[in-house]
Amino acid sequence: MADVNTIRSSAGSRAAQIDEGLRAHMNKVYGTMSVGMLITFAVAWAVGTAPALLSVFRDPITLQPNILGWIVMFAPLGMVFAFGAAINRLSAAGAQLFFYAFAGVMGLSLAWIFVAFTGFSIAQIFLITSIAFAGLSLWGYTTKKDISGWGSFLIMGVIGLVVASIVNLFLGSPAIMFAISAIGVLIFAGLTAYDTQNIKNTYLAHAHHGDQEWLQKSGIMGALSLYLNFINMFMMLLQLFGNRE
């Protein structure tokens, strides 16, 4: 009987350690994401409110991007693919540094919003996005429902949005932009819940292996996923409901 009690005690202790580790892991994910958001909006505000800096990337009147502006616009997409390809060769510290550099470049690509939209509107949409994101992520973390099946559908939706957005860069159709933004909000809302559950389940599946370096890099990839969901939801809500200057 003593052996059974010992086994139960050991199992309970191990489960408690995993639960504690999961909380620390999720806090790290959200913390990394939050720092990335801070970097993005600090860079965007600094450049967007300085006409001389913004003119390096866009015409200060029409806000049309120049060659450097086009490069900055597509650089985050290229960096995401590069990050995914290089993550196994990077250390955890290197992956985190790459993520923060990515957040800075994203800030450059978003700087124009501080000219196109009112400051109050940007703050209002940011608050709305934050509340929605928190609720969706909390639901994804706590729900007992397995939503892993959403992944393929949502990823196909993202690919469709990217293709439609590139096409609309040349068409300039307000109707298409409205449709992209409306559908995009729903897709990235779903991805927020899906990615949160996936981050949780990935940790639980690998916590027994004790590979802290891998778990740290996995957490940074999770932070990147949630960061992208937040940024995209924010931008699409801003396009839909933001008040222009």
Image (cartoon, grey):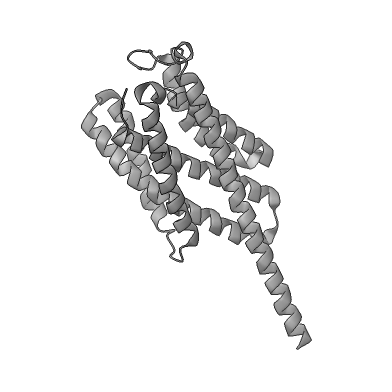
Q: Is residue 32 left or right of residue 135?
A: right
Q: Position of residue 104 (x, y in %)?
A: 54, 28
Q: Quadrant of residue 3?
A: bottom right
Rendered-image quadrant of the N terminus? bottom right
The residue most toward the bottom is 1
Q: Is residue 168 left or right of residue 112?
A: left
Residue occupying the point 46% across, 19% down: 49
Q: Is residue 199 above or below residue 39?
A: below
Q: Position of residue 58 (x, y in %)?
A: 40, 15
Q: Is residue 119 above or below residue 33?
A: above
Q: Is residue 136 above or below residue 50?
A: below
Q: Quadrant of residue 235?
A: top left
Q: Position of residue 73 (x, y in %)?
A: 43, 25
Residue occupying the point 54% across, 47% down: 222
**Residue 85 visible in the shown view:** no
**Residue 111 visible in the shown view:** yes
